Image (cartoon, rainbow, N blue to C red):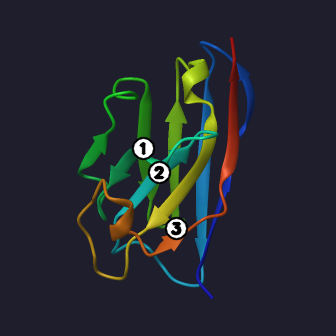
Amino acid sequence: QVQLVESGGGLVQAGGSLRLSCASSGRTFSSSALCWFRQAPGKEREFVATINWSGGSTYYADSVEGRFTISRDNAANTVALQMNSLKPEDTAVYYCAGRRLYQRSSSRSEYEYHYWGQGTQVTVSS
């Protein structure tokens, strides 16, 4: 069974940093694009950052560009999201997602991702 498990969420003050990690089991994602999405209370899930299979191509939502960094370690089968200069509006449940095998290109669309983690809560206090 394929699983993605996020960790690293928590409560942080505005201006602080958190590092989210997502570990996969059941299959390797080294040949698949990975992505982070988030969903705030009462809002739709939105794209945060995506990375292609090699890590050579990344894209970010305008709202996090310059503050967040997505990276991956294919040997460890993990993807991370370094979040700096956090703002209260970054408060949400953060999900990692993976595309199917050999779907190497990154995408901003949640419909392109077949595998999803259970989410980790990030709360930024003002």
Distance CA(mark 1)–CA(mark 3): 14 Å
Q: Residue at x 53, y 17 (%)?
A: 85
Q: Residue at x 35, y 72 (%)?
A: 32
Which type of secondary structure does the marked residue at label 1 adopt?
Answer: strand
Q: Nearer the viewer, residue 33 or 112?
A: 112
In the picture, the disc for residue 77 is 3
- Give the foreground label among 2 and 3: 2
- Residue topped by disc 2: 36
Q: Earlier in the sequence, mark 1 or mark 3?
A: 1
Which type of secondary structure does the marked residue at label 2 adopt?
Answer: strand
**Measured from the top left, where is residue 7 in percent x and y?**
69, 51
Q: Earlier in the sequence, mark 1 or mark 2?
A: 2
Q: Earlier in the sequence, mark 2 or mark 3?
A: 2
Furthest residue to the front? 42
- Residue topped by disc 1: 70
**Measured from the top left, where is residue 105 in percent x and y?**
23, 65
Furthest residue to the right? 11
